[in-house]
Amino acid sequence: MKLLRLGAPGAERPAVLTDDGRTRDLTGMTDDIDGPFLASGGVERVRAALRAGTLPVLDTTGLRVGPPVARPGKVVCIGLNYRDHAEETGAPVPERPVVFMKDPGTVVGPYDTVLVPRGSEKTDWEVELAVVIGRRARYLDGPADAAGVVAGFAVSNDVSERAFQLELSPQWDLGKSCETFNPLGPWLVTADEVPDPQALGLRLSVNGVARQDGTTKNMVFPVAHIVWYLSQYMVLEPGDVINTGTPAGVALGLPGTPYLRAGDTVELGIDGLGSQRQTFRDA
């Protein structure tokens, strides 16, 4: 299934996109697509309602597409998780996952405007596979247990301000947590539709110029390892989002470092998970 949220910011309504291309309204089943919905078997209830044919069709005309999960409790990110990206930035390939946090308030819709922060000279793009947690996870026994706690996957743009990230603080949070810096969606694709998260192509272009073209098979640490690893150090709650890293092709590693400016348009997508498009403007 493809779960989504439609409507103005803060007033999105839950829905599901079916195989026939129709959008079905979920407001009779849940107030939102969030942690409590996922934790209480919401995905299974929606699947049963689809089989029963009880969900009304939703007219989506003019409705904004919001992030497919209501504000997560936390957004956990994995840095330098593709060998080619580590190489282009001059960093060593990590021996353990590089973990940092991103303000959950950065999460916006896949087509929303993204703001270039005041004082920014180095705003950058990063197409990433996002993992959405569906069940509470603490001290998983091993990577094989990870699949049981994953609700699904989504496209994420881990927008970054490199000067804030790398020059102003020994930690990365300042350059990762600026307003609107995590477009997510358009859908939460349930895990059953993604049999192998390590076999997905990722791509991103800026103003029509291809910049990133990678595959999740080149992750240093695969999804299952990441989820297991994080559960050893923090409790993953339903609705939490994990950004799993980006392949080569970011502005930081390109000749001339063509960082983003107001008026630029970024388009990105992942096989089977949909696509995004954002236009940038000054904050």
Image: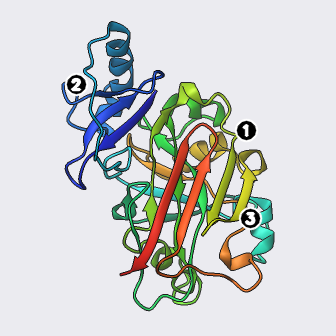
Badge 3 marks a residue whose secondary structure is loop
Coordinates of residue 216 in the picture (x, y in percent): 71, 47
Give me the residue at 32% from left, 7% from top: 52
- Compare residues 245 and 113 and report the one nearer the observer: 113
Whether residue 109 is situated above or below residue 19 in the rendered picture: below
Which amino acid, by three-letter code, is at mark 3?
Ala
Q: Residues within 10 Å of mark 1 (few under 14, many from 20)?
A: few
The reply to whether residue 150 is in sight is no
Which amino acid, by three-letter code, is at mark 2?
Met
Q: Which residue is mark 3?
A: 248
Give me the residue at 25% from left, 47% from top: 7
- Compare residues 207 and 128 and report the one nearer the observer: 207
Color theme of the render: rainbow
Coordinates of residue 274 in the picture (x, y in percent): 54, 43
Left or right for 24, reference 194: left
Q: Which residue is mark 1?
A: 199
Q: Which residue is mark 2?
A: 29
State if disc 1 and disc 2 touch (CB < 8 Å). no
Q: Residues within 10 Å of mark 3 (few under 14, many from 20)?
A: many
